[in-house]
Image (cartoon, rainbow, N blue to C red):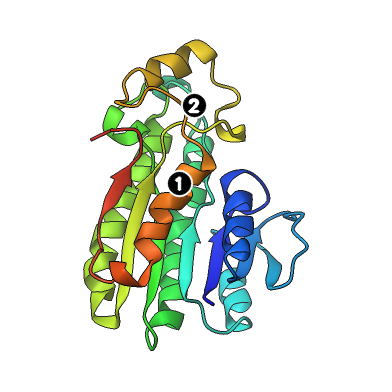
Amino acid sequence: MSTILITGTSKGIGNYLARYYLDKGNRVFGLSRTKSGIHRDNYADLFSSVSDEDTIKKILSGIGDIDILINNAGIASMNHTLLTPAKTAEDIMSTNFMGTFILSKECAKKMIKRGGRIVNFTTVSFPLNLEGEAIYSASKAAIESLTRTMAYELAQFNITVNAVGPTPIKTDLIKSVSEEKMLRLLNRQAIKKYADFGDVANVIDFFIKPESKFITGQTIYLGGIS
């Protein structure tokens, strides 16, 4: 049984992943600002913004060892660059990049003695240069850079760091995007359809299994994006 910390478990893919890894017999902590609705043995909700460093440190000091961190929490605002307020950009970078950075470094400190796995979330909007997603893509590009550098820095402690880049999944993150725009995006993929939560879990399973101890600093995009 592994102890897994997953961020953004109040809904969507984070909620799915928490239930998925509980079903596999793991101990799971879900970190969100609101309740997950999960009432299971070996599960506990933790409440904080992922970018609140002081609160994160206090929470982690009280939960013992962490074997696996899944940095799922993220927000988006799909606007043209010229129509994006600076505050919106700051909020996106704070949650997506700073949240990933803070959780990664604090969980890595707990993994040093035993090794561990860190899985970050990026997006296909970065390699596809999708219009209207400049700030969101920039935050994920920063996460990919962080992933590669941390992989080198943490390898000596037997900690691997990788990233998964989902194609569109029908979650709240894209509910405000027009169907026409989503179809244009899907047509740029080799596999021209929406992904589902299980597709993402499959990549995470690959990154965290014991046999993947030599896999680090990698990003896997779904849907045939390169």
Q: Nearer the viewer, residue 170 or 102?
A: 170
Looking at the image, residue 144 sits to the left or right of residue 1; the answer is left
The answer to whether one can see residue 53 in this image is: no
For marks 1 and 2 on the same chain, the one whose residue lies earlier in the sequence: 2
Tell me: 215 left or right of 106.
left
Residue at 52% of width from left, 50% of height from top? 95
Please tell me whether mark 2 sits on a helix, a strand or a loop.
loop
Q: Quadrant of residue 105?
A: bottom left
Residue 33 in the image: x percent, y percent? 68, 55
Which residue in the rendered view is the most extreme toward the top?
Answer: 180
> Along the line of sight, which residue is nearer the eye, 56 or 114?
114
**Residue type at numbered disc 1:** Val
Kindly tell me whether residue 74 is visible in this rendering: yes
Q: Which residue is mark 1?
A: 200
Kindly identify the residue that appears in the image at 54 percent across and 69 percent down.
4
Left-right relation of 10 to 153: right
Question: Residue 8: x and y, percent?
Answer: 59, 53
Q: Secondary structure at mark 1?
A: helix
Disc 2: which residue: 78
Residue drawn at 24 percent across, 62 percent down: 149
In this rendering, the count of numbered labels is 2
Report x, y in % for residue 137. Answer: 37, 36
